[in-house]
Amino acid sequence: MNQKNYLITRRPKDNFLKKHIAYYYFHVSNDEEHSEAFYFYPNFMHALTIYKGNDVEIDLDGKSSKVRTSADTDKLTFLYCINLKDKIHVDLQGTYHKIGIVFYPLGINHFIDKPLNEFLSNSFQKLIMDTIFEEHIRTLKKEQPLEEQVEILESALIAVMRPFENKVMQRAVREIILSNGTIKVDALEAITFTARKTLLRLFKKHLYATIEDYKKMVMFRNSLNYALQHQEMLNLTDIALYSMYYDQSHFIRHFKSITEETPKTLLPKIVQIGNEDLYWHFIDEK
């Protein structure tokens, strides 16, 4: 790639990866004076983010990160984010090479060698990845053609894939998403033939979340996606009804509790990146 700055999304090519990964994104700056800041919002599709040649700092509250050019051009940083409740601030300065892998629900579980709650100690943190994965990623350069970068990234993922099978979790997550987060826990018990206590334990183990937090996040994210995709045609009542909130007031309260703004003020500020549901709110911090 010879572009100075770019952000491009790509879908997986490998058939196995297509089942577990929604898309990749490649975010690059070759400009030492570049400055960029944005918020991103809760999503039931979690992201593994890879920075090459950058110093990355996460604040103690887990709600913001700062990325700067590193003196070590070979430095690798892996971040994983499970964002259930908050907007998260990202501040990028100078040159950077950022690769995002956006997983479908339970997708990351196919590429780690232990349950997610043993892999993580926080919902937004730096990770130590498998050595084989890291070795592949080190060969990926931002100067390479994008399709070559995708091939290397997929080779890295395939090298560490470990099929994850838990039919109870897969069914429970599917039902929550299909119901837009409105399904009751007792209904999940009946559908999965699994006791509430076991379901609660499995969600903590494999999704690093409670069932109720996961349900609320699904409802918020689906309402955000729907609103952004149809905002020229819809009013807030339409969005609330489609998203199965009790009423418009319920939707606005939930939206504001996460974003700290009302839908009316925030939605026009959010930008879609590429052709996927990657929505960021860019902010001017000068």
Image: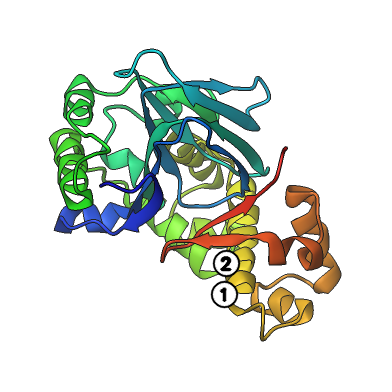
Q: Quick one: 93 or 230, which is closer to the camera?
A: 93
The kind of residue on which mark 2 rests is Asn
Residue 252 percent location from the top left of the image: 81, 64
- Labels 2 and 1 touching (C-beta < 8 A): yes
Residue 253 percent location from the top left of the image: 83, 59
Say which residue appears at 54% left-offset and 41% top-offset: 200
The secondary element bearing badge 1 is classed as helix
Q: Is residue 110 above or below residue 170?
A: above
Task: Specify the quadrant of the image occupied by residue 210.
Answer: top right
Q: Quadrant of the C terminus?
A: top right
The secondary element bearing badge 2 is classed as helix
Q: Quick one: 180 or 53, which is closer to the camera?
A: 53
Say which residue appears at 62% left-offset and 45% top-offset: 38
Quick one: label 1, few (<14), some, or many (20+) residues within 10 Å?
few
Name the residue beneath numbered marker 2. 225
- Of all residues, the one furthest to the top in this rendering is 71
The kind of residue on which mark 1 rests is Gln
- Of all residues, the one furthest to the bottom in this rendering is 233
In-image side of 62 versus 259 (left or right): left
Residue 263 percent location from the top left of the image: 77, 65
Which mark, residue 229?
1
Q: Quick one: 263 or 42, which is closer to the camera?
A: 263
What colouring method underlies this structural image?
A: rainbow
Say which residue appears at 42% left-offset and 32% top-offset: 96
In-image side of 118 versus 65 (left or right): left
Q: Quick one: 18 or 195, which is closer to the camera?
A: 18
